[in-house]
Image (tube, rainbow, N blue to C red):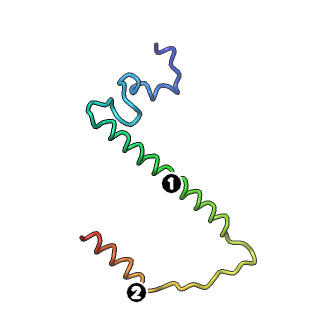
């Protein structure tokens, strides 16, 4: 049996022998299927948002890159009231 295996199939061998999935062991309860589905749903949502955010970041990096002839806009660099608000409000939410 070992002579028929390639190196690419070796990492999956323990899972194939155990009968489990990639992430979880074999289902042993009535709620396992629901837990697996919830985990997979959250995993795929995270992957979709990760790819979308990385794609948007790359797009805006290219679109707004520094180019010769374009001047930087003057913006305010400090706003004490705003900085205190976005520091204190999350602190209060976390304390509640």
Circle number at residue 65: none
- The residue depicted at 46 percent of the width and 50 percent of the height is 45
- The residue depicted at 42 percent of the width and 86 percent of the height is 80
Instruction: Determine the image quadrant of residue 75.
Output: bottom right
Q: In the displayed image of the protein, which residue is found farthest to the right?
A: 69
Q: Is residue 44 above or below residue 57?
A: above
Q: Residues within 10 Å of mark 1 (few under 14, many from 20)?
A: few
Q: In the displayed image of the protein, which residue is found farthest to the left?
A: 96
Name the secondary structure under disc 1: helix
Tell me residue 92's x, y (percent): 28, 75
- The residue depicted at 33 percent of the width and 73 percent of the height is 90
Instruction: Determine the image quadrant of residue 13.
Output: top left
- The residue identified by callout 2 is 81
Tell me residue 65's x, y (percent): 67, 69
Q: Is residue 21 above or below residue 62?
A: above
Is 50 left, or right, of 17 in this rendering? Answer: right
Name the secondary structure under disc 2: helix
- Taking depth in this image into account, of 54 and 10 the one nearest to the observer is 54
**How much space separates mark 2 and mark 1, taking CA atoms?**
32 Å
Tell me residue 5's x, y (percent): 50, 19
- The residue identified by callout 1 is 50
């Amino acid at each position: 049996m070992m002579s028929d295996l390639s190196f690419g199939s070796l990492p999956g061998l323990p899972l194939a022998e155990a009968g489990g999935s990639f992430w979880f062991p074999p289902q042993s309860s009535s709620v396992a299927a629901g837990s697996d589905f919830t985990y997979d749903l959250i995993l795929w949502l995270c992957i979709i948002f990760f790819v979308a955010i990385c794609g948007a970041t790359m797009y805006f990096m290219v679109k707004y890159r520094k180019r010769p002839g374009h001047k930087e806009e003057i913006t305010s660099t400090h706003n004490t009231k705003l900085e205190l608000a976005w520091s204190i409000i999350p602190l209060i939410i976390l304390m509640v």
